[in-house]
Amino acid sequence: MVLRRSVLQSLAVLVILFGAVIIAPTMALSAAGDEHSTHSSGEHAAAVASEKAEGPAGHHEGSAAPESDDGWILGANITAAIAVILFLVARGRRRESIPGNPNSAKSADGQDPSLKHPTRLSALDRIFRSPLYPIVPQAAVIGVFVYILFALLFGSSNPSNNFGSVMVWIMWWPVIPITFVLAGRFWCSLCPWGALSDWLQTHLSLGLKVPKVIKKYGIWVIFGGFMFITWYDLAFGLTTSATATITVLLVVAVLALITSVLFERRVWCRYLCPLGGIFGNYSQAAIVEFRGTPEKCATCSKHACYKGAQAAPGCPLIEFPLSMESNRLCNLCGNCVKNCENGSPKLKWRLPGKELWEKRDGRLDEAVLASVLVGVILMAGFGMLEFWQAWVTTTSTYLGIPEWVIVTIAYIAAALAGLGLSILASAFSARGTTEGTWANLTRYGYALIPLNLATHISHNMFHFLGEGKTIGTVSQKLVGIGPAYAAAAGHASGGHGAAALVSPAGIRWVQFTLMGLGIAASILVTWKIARRGTIRRETAPLEASAGAGVATSKSSIWRGFGPQLAVITMFSFVSFMLFVLPMAARH
């Protein structure tokens, strides 16, 4: 009976959401059509001319037919309100019953574990224990994403004037890497697709165990997905196409929801999500960490942090806080804090990069991913340069092959160069220890993560700081107080126009500062790894013939450190050269 009621409730909610998504846009488009029909032929011609004049050339999709600036907003308002209300109601009732968790009951004394305060709570502890976290922030993010989806579907074809394109590529994508340094995978706890997956899983999930093939090869699905997205942007222009952008968002949403119905917890987020996997890689350099308190966990037999309890489900990423030693699979959702009666999980400060040089169980596939990302990120930087498209076109014409083939060849070459140089450096580093090339790559590959993160942030800061005023412009239009798009969105190439938040010199100063910090962090991590000089045998299965050794002398430390320093210096030099050359505005 309970299952039947849950299914009926879920179907009712889905029907309402479907009606909102279909009816509301229809009303919006109808209103836009009525408004457009009242325009005179002269006003109509002026509107067409204005639309053609907006933004840089080549960024329009489809025909040059006139379109309403705000016809989609009505539909977005209705759908956002319905979606947020339904989400809050559904998640509020979730505490009543948590299917699939054997510990889904109150404690022995009948009290909700989330209400017990065994120790004095800090401000952060109170936030994580609150039933409003992360539900309220998730609801806010869902509301914003409704506007983004509507804008991408029905808004301006000019990405400079499209709320969805601007928020995704000028706001979210440049800023999100900064959160990895400050709070690890915090974004994953707010991700709208993850939040909807949690809700759907409460009612409809089959709860299947994670297949071994996904556990073993999921990292390569993550890697391949990220590589494909990056390549597609370079080859076909993902950031300048609303259609391509919403396609990526919806594909990710569908895959996340399907896996939530089939499997237990957030299998998509842990094993398969391209963005989540890269975010987890970067989060290992964060300045905070969630860890259990060993002496408190030693006396616990319930393991509610992992299994779940009345207060909240178990860890969505299938992690056990007691044994967790990495930020890679912690999204700061707070479930373990709500469920633990002993107050064991704590958010702690740490030196950025400390996890990387203290890592005991490094993985070769993660180290390879970090090495390949160096070349991929640098290639993405080349794609931002003003001369890039002209060079691709000229080369394509000269060789008589499609432009996307030229981009693909350059992309593969850059990725292989990053990996090849890391392998070469690891081979030279092996001369200073008794470990082989692959064992050294497993160790030193993690040292590239701060450099990758700094390069990623620095390149994207150009777009955020150089085009950031468009965020305010398109946002003001949602409430009808902003100036006309055509009058406020214009900006010159390279972030020199009215859309820039700071001057070109200021942008370059920010980029150089961020890169300097990233380079220093990578060098520090490399030095710490070289001094540590040991590696667990099981972390380098490809080096079965090599014995585990210890590098203790100064000469052996420098033999391990020197080649890695040379590669970091080489990558850093290329990054700085990219910042000196003129970049093109994204929109």
Image (spheres, rainbow, N blue to C red):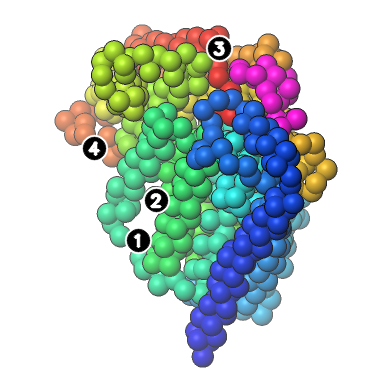
Residue 115: x and y in percent read 72, 68
Q: Quadrant of residue 29?
A: bottom right
208 lies left or right of 385: left
Residue under numbered circle 3: 582
The foreground one among 416 and 113 is 416
Of mark 1 and mark 4, the one earlier in the sequence is 1
Residue under numbered circle 1: 210
Residue 23: x and y in percent read 62, 67
- The disc label shown at residue 306, or none: none
- The disc label shown at residue 271, or none: 2
Tell me, yes or no, whether the highlighted magenta stretch contains residue 498. yes
7 lies left or right of 35: left
Mark 3 Cα-neighbour bin, 10 Å: few <14, some 14–19, many ≥20: some
Q: Nearer the viewer, mark 3 or mark 4?
A: 3
Please provide the residue range marked out in magenta. 486-502
- The disc label shown at residue 541, or none: 4
The answer to whether mark 3 and mark 4 are in CB contact below 8 A is no
The foreground one among 517 and 382 is 382
The foreground one among 178 and 388 is 388
Magenta: main secondary structure: loop
The disc labelled 2 sits on which kind of residue? Answer: Tyr
The disc labelled 3 sits on which kind of residue? Answer: Pro
Of mark 4 and mark 2, the one earlier in the sequence is 2
Q: Nearer the viewer, mark 4 or mark 2?
A: 2
Q: Quadrant of residue 32?
A: bottom right
Q: CA distance from mark 3 to mark 4?
A: 45 Å
The answer to whether mark 1 and mark 2 are in CB contact below 8 A is yes
Mark 1 Cα-neighbour bin, 10 Å: few <14, some 14–19, many ≥20: some
